[in-house]
Image (cartoon, rainbow, N blue to C red):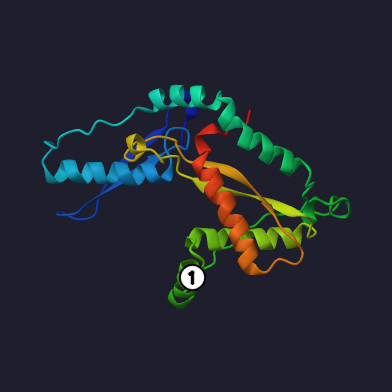
């Protein structure tokens, strides 16, 4: 854990396994880095290790510069219009899960975490479906999640789900280390007569629309 009062946001631990092997463990707070950042940092350290510290440093945009740029971007009216319309659509849904309905409020609610392992055969089927429909596997999974939330929330006119975007759509940010990842809301209009192909198309369009405008999103 991190002691934020002391300003701790990054931990490094070097563990000795035997006389010839050691293990370097990096741990970063979500306040300063996302999951993608740790992978990039590990690769940078590996490069330095292989070159004995003489690797040419890459010119990478600093997070402070990115934050200043993003503030300017989110103030642009053209970018805000998309998310304002999405917020209007979402407000009309009044989406509530079973546990949020009045009859369930007096019941004890204990959230749990469940890990589901996907077999190689299932993954191949997902990849085949994605290839056939010209979407990504992530979009196939998102569409399945949207269908489940739609059913659990009363099968209304649509659902809102959130999907992670790593925030590195520009070349200058591809190797950047910082807290760029964000979860963006996706409004998906669903009809009771939709088949899975139609649902997949709606979700795919929502994912790609959010991705192309992710830098304009603000929760404020």
Classify residue 55 as left or right of residue 144: left
- Callout 1: 10 Å neighbours few (<14), some, many (20+)? few
Look at 48% across and 63% down and name the residue there: 134
* Quadrant position of the C terminus in the picture: top right
Classify residue 166 as left or right of residue 21: right
Classify residue 176 as left or right of residue 147: left
Above-or-below relation of 200 to 94: below
Residue 28 image point, x, y percent: 40, 38
Q: Nearer the viewer, residue 114 or 203?
A: 203
Residue 53 image point, x, y percent: 13, 37
Q: Nearer the viewer, residue 71 or 152?
A: 71
Residue 44 image point, x, y percent: 24, 42
Look at 36% across and 36% down and name the residue there: 173
Residue 112 falls in image quadrant:
bottom right
Residue 54 falls in image quadrant:
top left
Look at 11% across and 40% down and name the residue there: 52
Mark 1 = which residue?
Answer: 132
Residue lying at the far bottom in this picture: please name it: 121
Look at 88% across and 50% down and name the residue there: 102
Above-or-below relation of 1 to 163: above
């Amino acid at each position: 854990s991190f002691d934020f009062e002391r300003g701790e946001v990054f931990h490094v631990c070097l563990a000795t396994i035997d006389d010839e092997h050691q293990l370097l463990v990096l741990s970063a707070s979500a306040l300063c880095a996302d999951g993608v950042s740790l992978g990039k940092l590990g690769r940078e350290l590996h490069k330095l290790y292989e070159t004995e510290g003489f690797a040419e440093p890459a010119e990478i945009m600093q997070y402070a510069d990115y934050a200043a740029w993003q503030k300017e971007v989110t103030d642009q009216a053209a970018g805000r219009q998309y998310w304002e319309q999405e917020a209007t659509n979402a407000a009309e849904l009044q989406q509530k899960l079973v546990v949020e309905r009045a009859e369930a409020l007096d019941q004890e609610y204990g959230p749990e975490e469940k890990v589901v392992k996907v077999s190689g055969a299932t993954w191949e089927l997902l990849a085949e479906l994605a290839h056939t429909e010209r979407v990504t596997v992530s979009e196939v999974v998102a569409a399945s999640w949207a269908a489940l939330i739609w059913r659990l929330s009363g099968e209304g006119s649509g659902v809102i789900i959130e999907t992670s975007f790593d925030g590195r759509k520009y070349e200058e940010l591809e190797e950047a280390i910082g807290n760029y990842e964000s979860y963006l809301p996706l409004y998906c209009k669903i009809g009771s007569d939709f088949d899975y192909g139609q649902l997949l198309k709606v979700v795919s369009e929502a994912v790609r629309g959010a991705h192309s405008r992710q830098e304009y999103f603000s929760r404020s």
